[in-house]
Image: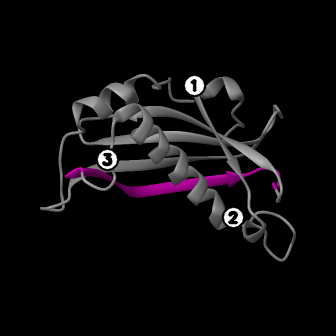
Amino acid sequence: MTSRLDRDCFPEFYAIDTRWSDNDIYGHVNNVQYYSFFDSAVNRFLIEHGGLDIHNDQVVGFVVESKCQYFSPIAYPDTIEIGLSVTKLSNRSVTYQLGVFVQGQPDICAQGHFVHVFVDQASNQSVAIPDQIRQALNSIVISQI
């Protein structure tokens, strides 16, 4: 088991309000929702800091791998914060590290990683990460934990 990360491992955070529909029959946010939280935080970062235009850009990131470890439950109506960092940046791909925290709380509830390969939409072939996106990703690179 990987050791639990703390807030210092994440240079960027995004707040997300949980929704009633995120809860499952057991009264906590269902595990599949965490991947949606990860996807939302990563893409928000790419849009806000990397200039990604999700509707018109020819190069986009495809998820090729994801993982999540769960430590403690979250539940509606929690507001959560998704911590985001980059642990590996290559020519055509990036590995993100993510953490789920209840807003204002120090302890991590879940952590995971998410790998994007950048792809030309027309050819469906991997390509180099666009310069503006690479610069943004470089700003949140940390050492592998």
Residue 11's label in the rendered image is: 1
Q: Return the residue found at the far left.
A: 123
Residue 46: x and y in percent read: 40, 40
Q: Which SS class for mark 2?
A: helix
* Magenta segment includes 70: yes
Residue 111: x and y in percent read: 65, 45
* Magenta segment includes 142: no
Give the answer, above or below, for where 27 lies relative to 116: below
User: Mark 1 belongs to which amino acid?
Assistant: Pro
Residue shown at the point (58%, 41%) measured from the top left = 98
Residue that carries the numbered disc 3 in the rendered image: 53
Q: Nearer the viewer, residue 74 or 103?
A: 103
Question: Which mark sits nearer the N-terminus, 1 or 2?
Answer: 1
Residue 24's label in the rendered image is: none
Give the residues in magenta. 57-74
Q: Return the residue found at the far bottom.
A: 25
Residue shown at the point (82%, 55%) measured from the top left = 73
Q: Nearer the viewer, residue 78 or 28?
A: 78
Q: Which SS class for mark 3?
A: loop
Residue that carries the numbered disc 2 in the rendered image: 31
Whether residue 117 is visible to the viewer of this picture, yes or no, is yes
User: Mark 3 belongs to which amino acid?
Assistant: Asp
Camera-side mark, 1 or 2: 1
